[in-house]
Image: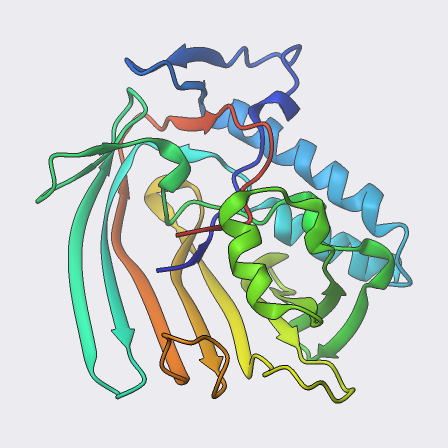
Amino acid sequence: MLVVAGLSSCSQFNSANESHPDHAADSDGQHFTRMDVASMREYRDGRRAEFAESLSQSQLSKQHQELLATAMAKTYVGIPVSSYTETNQFVGVDKDVSEETENWKVTDTGYLQGETDSTNLDLRFTAPFFALPLSAYLPETGRLLEESDSKATFEFKIDIGKHDDTIANMIFSLSTNTAWIMQISTIKSTQSPESVILKIQPPTYDSPEPKLEALSLEVRYSYIDSCECFAVTSDSVEIELPEGYEEFVEPGLRTSTATYSNIVCDQPLQYLLPDLEQPLFLDE
């Protein structure tokens, strides 16, 4: 299954802040920063400042820049020591549905452990706590897509070429000669994130090559009281391949959806921030 999985680099954290986050490593040498609530909020405020600075390049109003920067920064919290249930559902071209559920635990030693799987995964694969990388979108292309009394949705173009992750390149190679856009929906009263959609825009010109019919990713956020932060409660991928696109791949529409429930953070709150040089845009 494909998920958006942008974890921001720990190197962006200001080591001179007053909260003095702890740096640690697991038994495999994976380094991460351990933050308390105060440190997490300082880290989040730093991301907000970066968003606000970049959005000054856009034609959005100051009010909309403030709303968007504040909302998106709230997705940058690291990975809380927590437990949650993940349910994955896949619908194939033939409309057959398969589903599986797993209970996960994020340990304070920097591992992701499954209830029925003894394998320890590193934190780069952790959902539902992930955010979109700051470098993904082109701020100067930002525009207000729609607005109501309660919500505002913004749209940006995306520069995929900024990401060198191998898996990301494999996925984006499916969408050759297409443009990518990001749509961010926010809740105005709380200046919080509601959803992010990334999707392709097929070219308007004719091409002899088969075109990818659809490729989109949607992430939805909710506030988790026990974690004092926002988390992803669902992410979904939709891909539609045309006839003749791949020799051994059946054409048609496929969808994959992951939902995250029973999200509970350990007390006292701890947030782990892996040392990644670049945010991961897509994972598998």
Q: Please tell me which residue is depicted at 56% across the width and 79% down the height of the picture.
A: 212
Q: Position of residue 170 (x, y in %)?
A: 52, 55
Tell which of 260 and 239 is nearer to you: 239
Tell which of 126 and 37 is nearer to you: 126
Q: Is residue 27 above or below residue 228?
A: above
Tell which of 187 and 107 is nearer to you: 107
Q: Position of residue 184 (x, y in %)?
A: 64, 65
Q: Position of residue 188 (x, y in %)?
A: 65, 65
Q: Is residue 125 left or right of residue 239?
A: left
Q: Quadrant for residue 106, please give it.
A: top left
Q: Is residue 121 above or below residue 207?
A: above
Q: Is residue 30 above or below residue 90?
A: above
Work out whether residue 150 can be spotted: no
Q: Please tell me which residue is depicted at 82% across the width and 51% down the height of the picture.
A: 55
Q: Residue furthest left?
A: 116
Q: Please tell me which residue is depicted at 84% across the width and 63% down the height of the picture.
A: 141
Tell which of 28 and 47 is nearer to you: 28
Work out whether residue 219 can be spotted: yes
Q: Please tell me which residue is depicted at 66% across the width and 10% down the height of the picture.
A: 16
The N terminus appears in which quarter of the rendering?
bottom left
Q: Quadrant for residue 48, please give it.
A: top right
